[in-house]
Image (tube, helix red, strand yellow):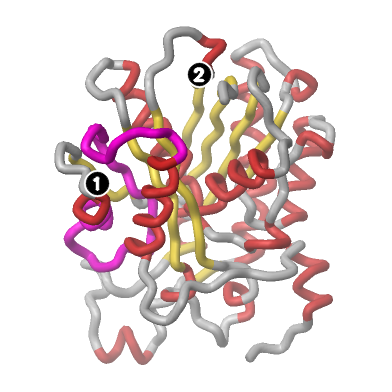
Amino acid sequence: MVETSDQWILERTGIRQRHMARQGETTADLATMAAKQVLERSGVDAKDIDMIIVATITPDMQLPSTACLVQDRIGATKAWGFDLSAACCGFLYGLQVAVQFVISGAHKNVLVIGIDVMSSIIDYTDRQTCIIFGDGGGAALIQPTANESEGCFIDFLHEVDGSGGEFLCLPGGGSKNPTSHETVDKRMHYVYQDGQAVFKFATRKMAEVCLRLLERNGLTGDDVDVFIPHQANLRIIKSVVERLQVSMDKVVINIDEYGNTTAGTLPLALETAVQTKRIKKGDLVLLGAMGAGYSAGAALMRWGI
């Protein structure tokens, strides 16, 4: 479809394959499946969910929110919720929102879902984007714990820099460029990316926020047991790991299998860590992300499962 090859893609991104939603399968469909799976694993009844946060840039529609659709489909009759649009940082930001509601005592069960059906907004004639993005994601349940040994979030650091907004965006369909024949003809309803600018930002900023978070907690890369980065590009991940001075055997990488699923990468990587037994109770886990906005973030947690 574009001038490229498997070797070219693999060398520049680390991606071997990606997954695509079935025809007609939406973000709400995938989010509902993820939500049901996490509820089954945790043994929590949907009626006990207090809040649902869906991190996505591919909602089923502009309104209502995907969170509303998921709430109805899983039968979370007492829950409220909303969508969070922060692209690749969405799941990480959603986790912190959930944590703050739990810490405050306002809620006991907060469902955080990171899902994107990127195939719905990708121009498959644009080599800069079409080789990178896939569909998928996952869900997590945030609850209070009696003590730190049961797992806890330690600290977080988030940033946005709107001066980089033009380099990774979806120009059409908003109040600036409402949908019209012209916006469709100009292919403005697909993701636009200045690959070089985004790459430079990502390699610098994800490492920077992770290092600052570690430093203010009196930690170094050696103290990290598991590093779970946003899966944007293997070269970006390796550059960040080098700056953090974290051993590669501590880094969870699955971009080769899923590509960049935007808000879905961190929950998918967490699931990979669990399924491959790369993460165990008591581990110090560092999460890092960067993406459109520009946005960036990092979080430290003690794994308790």
Q: Name the kind of residue labelled 2 in the image.
A: Cys
Name the spot of residue 179 as percent of width and height, x first: 24, 80
On screen, residue 110 above or below 32: above
Q: Amino acid at mark 1?
A: Phe
Which quarter of the picture shows residue 225? top right
Q: From the image, tell me which residue sits under label 2.
A: 152
Q: Which mark is residue 302?
A: none
Q: Which mark is residue 82?
A: 1
Quadrant showing the C terminus = top right
Q: Residue at x 66, y 11 (%)?
A: 218
Is residue 160 visible in the rendered image? The answer is no
Q: Residue 255's x, y, as percent?
A: 68, 57
Seen from the viewer's position, the closer of residues 27 and 109 is 109
Q: Calculate the distance from the C-alpha at mark 1 to the C-alpha at mark 2.
A: 24 Å
Magenta stretch encompasses residue 46: yes
Q: Residue at x 43, y 48 (%)?
A: 37
SS of the residue under disc 2: strand
Q: Taking 191 as reference, is 260 left or right?
A: right
Image quarter hosting the N terminus: bottom right
Is residue 12 found left or right of 301 in the rendered image?
A: right
Span colored in magenta:
41-70
* Label whose residue precedes the other's in the sequence (1 or 2): 1
Where on the picture, by quarter, is residue 49? Answer: top left
